Image (tube, coloured by chain):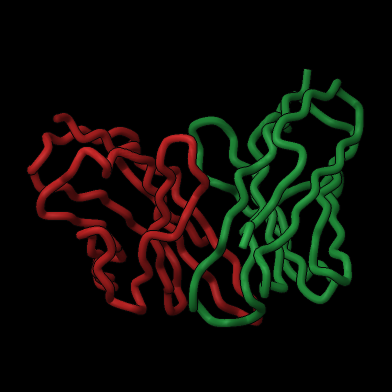
Amino acid sequence: AQRVTQPEKLLSVFKGAPVELKCNYSYSGSPELFWYVQYSRQRLQLLLRHISRESIKGFTADLNKGETSFHLKKPFAQEEDSAMYYCALVLWTSYDKVIFGPGTSLSVIP
Amino acid sequence: DAGVTQSPTHLIKTRGQQVTLRCSPKSGHDTVSWYQQALGQGPQFIFQYYEEEERQRGNFPDRFSGHQFPNYSSELNVNALLLGDSALYLCASSLGAVRGAEGYTFGSGTRLTVV
């Protein structure tokens, strides 16, 4: 069955430290992966998608098919990065269906 | 652009009752997906509507049903409410079958509490 796991429920890092949010998936097909972010009192929003290989707000994520991972990384954490982060897997058959992981709450300590 | 609009924002219902939640998609979007987000968990896919038809469904019982109107807005109906239905219900809109293009645009959600 298709599944997304995020092993850390909570992650605390100091400002300026590197941060890595882990995401693993299980899917036999060709995966398309996203990271969504939810800041306090705001709605869930797209952060980045693997197919565009972009860097948003200093975050990057590389799809590793061998390890079935899509970890989110940032070299220097900022206080405004504190939020809930969800990794998501898009299944494409005829239509799209998004499977979300349970989320990781990132807290950046000043 | 108001983005995705959901109503109401909060709702309290009694066990056994029925509820209807509403969603207006982002301008230009024609596909609406509904998600249930229980406390401390990620969103769980309920179903998706496109061209006024349900085209995909997650692992939710038939008590959960929906509808999409010609203007692409959508409703989620839940019958015979259970305490376990208490959650944040999210609506997300997207543009048809545009593969992975821009992901989903989410609404702020409706917080349903069943007592």
Q: Position of residue A18 (x, y in %)?
A: 10, 48
Q: As drawn, is B33 to the left or to the right of A66?
A: right
Q: As drawn, is B5 to the left or to the right of A14?
A: right
Q: Residue at x 80, y 62 (%)?
A: B73
Q: How many marks?
A: 0
Q: Nearer the viewer, residue B97 or B6?
A: B6
Residue ranking furthest to the top: B115
Q: Position of residue A7 (x, y in %)?
A: 31, 43
Q: Nearer the viewer, residue A12 or A38?
A: A38
Q: As drawn, is A65 to the left or to the right of B66?
A: left
Q: From this view, report whether residue B36 is shown above or below residue B99.
A: above
Q: Nearer the viewer, residue A81 or A10?
A: A81
Residue ranking furthest to the front: B1
User: Which of the image's four quarters has the C terminus of chain B?
Assistant: top right
Q: Residue at x 46, y 77 (%)?
A: A29
Q: Residue at x 81, y 58 (%)?
A: B74
Q: Residue at x 30, y 33 (%)?
A: A10
Q: As drawn, is A14 to the left or to the right of B58?
A: left
Quadrant hosting residue B3: bottom right
Q: Position of residue B41 (x, y in %)?
A: 50, 38
Q: Position of residue A19 (x, y in %)?
A: 16, 47
Colour of chain A as rendered: red
Quadrant hosting residue B93: bottom right
User: Which of the image's four quarters has the N terminus of chain B?
Assistant: bottom right
Among the chains pictured, the one given green colouring is: B
